[in-house]
């Protein structure tokens, strides 16, 4: 967002409205001396001059404006962010169409593969009321309810066990491996998405292979599809120091948003991080990556 000039409204200073947005954004007063305080002010007053109960006719401008709003979240206090989200959702409740549009843009900006800022806590604040709203279609409510279930089931700090079918066609689980390692890495793949580059990066990284071969790390490569002989034959060519498997129910059981997707667990199967890209995982394993 580029601020080119300042106007003064009844609420205070606002930046000049930018093309492709719904309104001019608020500017924090000089009394807000820190980045956090300035972002807190902007978030708290972001929607002051917009009546979300009225029909939204420009969906593209709404999404652009919403994404600009989200850009401030990472620098603001969580309580301020959550209070602003609750206020926005409550105001949107009076217009079912707008409420549904709010859910759509929130998913894109905070949850889906196009999101630049992933936050379960903030996204849940958006969709929990939507999952319970009687003004929305049942299919829409059920979609958000399913997302809530998956996110609540897979949170950092939880003990995570994963069931899968191995290359030999035998069902097993992460806990059944009974390893003594410092960390587990789970690489989730979707056969409909080309993951070759990600697999090659992981299989050829010297630092990661050193950790695997020394027994400090175990890497599981799990495809979210049904077992078949053809799949097993193809997957047998993956790195020979990986544990490879698959499971058609992994998509429903876990919170998987993009592929390839990496989970990082400690040696007791406590989830440390989820929805990591291959690049993000590599930077954790190898600071020089």
Image (cartoon, grey):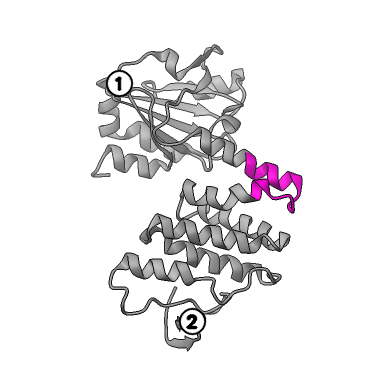
**Residue at 55% in and 79% down:** 19
Highlighted magenta segment, given as a residue range: 130-145
Residue 275 sits in quarter = top left
**Residue at 30% in and 21% down:** 181
Q: Is residue 143 located in the magenta-colored stretch of the structure?
A: yes
Mark 1 Cα shell of 10 Å, populated few (<14), some (14-19), many (≥20): some
**Residue at 50% in and 14% down:** 172
Against 275, residue 38 (above or below) is below
Spatial CA span between label 2 and label 1: 57 Å
96 left or right of 102 in image: right
Question: Does residue 113 appear in this view?
Answer: no
Q: Position of residue 48 (x, y in %)?
A: 54, 74
The number of callouts visible is 2
Q: Is residue 219 located in the magenta-colored stretch of the structure?
A: no
Question: Does residue 145 appear in this view?
Answer: yes
**Residue at 62% in and 64% down:** 91
Q: Which mark is residue 181?
A: 1
- Name the residue that disc number 2 marks: 11
Q: Position of residue 31 (x, y in %)?
A: 31, 77
Q: Earlier in the sequence, mark 2 or mark 1?
A: 2
Q: Quadrant of the C terminus?
A: top left
**Helix, strand or loop at disc 1?**
loop
Mark 2 Cα shell of 10 Å, populated few (<14), some (14-19), many (≥20): few
**Helix, strand or loop at disc 2?**
loop
Q: Which mark is residue 167?
A: none
Observer-side mark, 2 or 1, equals: 2
Disc 2 vs disc 1: Cβ atoms closer than 8 Å? no
51 left or right of 9 in image: right
Q: Position of residue 84 (x, y in %)?
A: 50, 62
169 left or right of 98 in image: left
Magenta stretch: dominant SS? helix
């Amino acid at each position: 967002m580029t601020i080119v000039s300042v106007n003064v409204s009844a609420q205070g200073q606002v930046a000049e409205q930018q093309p492709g947005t719904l309104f001019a954004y608020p500017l924090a007063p000089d009394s807000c001396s820190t980045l956090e305080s300035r972002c807190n002010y902007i978030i708290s007053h972001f929607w002051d001059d917009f009546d979300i109960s009225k029909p939204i006719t420009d969906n593209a401008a709404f999404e652009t404006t919403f994404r600009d709003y989200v850009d401030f979240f990472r620098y603001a206090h969580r309580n301020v962010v959550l209070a602003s989200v609750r206020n926005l959702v409550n105001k949107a409740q009076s217009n079912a169409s707008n409420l549904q549009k709010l859910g759509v843009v929130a998913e894109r900006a905070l949850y889906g593969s196009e999101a630049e800022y992933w936050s379960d806590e903030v996204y849940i604040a958006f969709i929990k009321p939507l999952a319970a709203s009687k003004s929305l279609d049942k299919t829409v409510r059920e979609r958000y309810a399913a997302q809530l279930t998956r996110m609540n089931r897979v949170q950092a700090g939880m003990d995570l066990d994963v069931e899968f079918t191995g290359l030999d066609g035998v069902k097993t689980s992460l806990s059944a491996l009974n390893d003594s390692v410092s960390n587990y890495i789970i690489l989730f793949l979707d056969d409909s998405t080309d993951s070759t580059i990600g697999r090659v990066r992981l299989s050829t990284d010297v630092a990661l292979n050193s950790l695997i071969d020394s027994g400090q790390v175990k890497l599981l490569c799990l495809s979210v599809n049904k077992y078949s002989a053809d799949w097993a034959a193809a997957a047998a060519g993956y790195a020979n120091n990986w544990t490879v498997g698959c499971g058609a129910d992994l998509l429903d059981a876990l919170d998987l948003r993009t592929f390839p997707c990496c989970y990082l667990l400690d040696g007791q199967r406590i989830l440390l991080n989820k929805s990591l890209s291959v690049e993000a995982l590599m930077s954790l394993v190898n600071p020089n990556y």
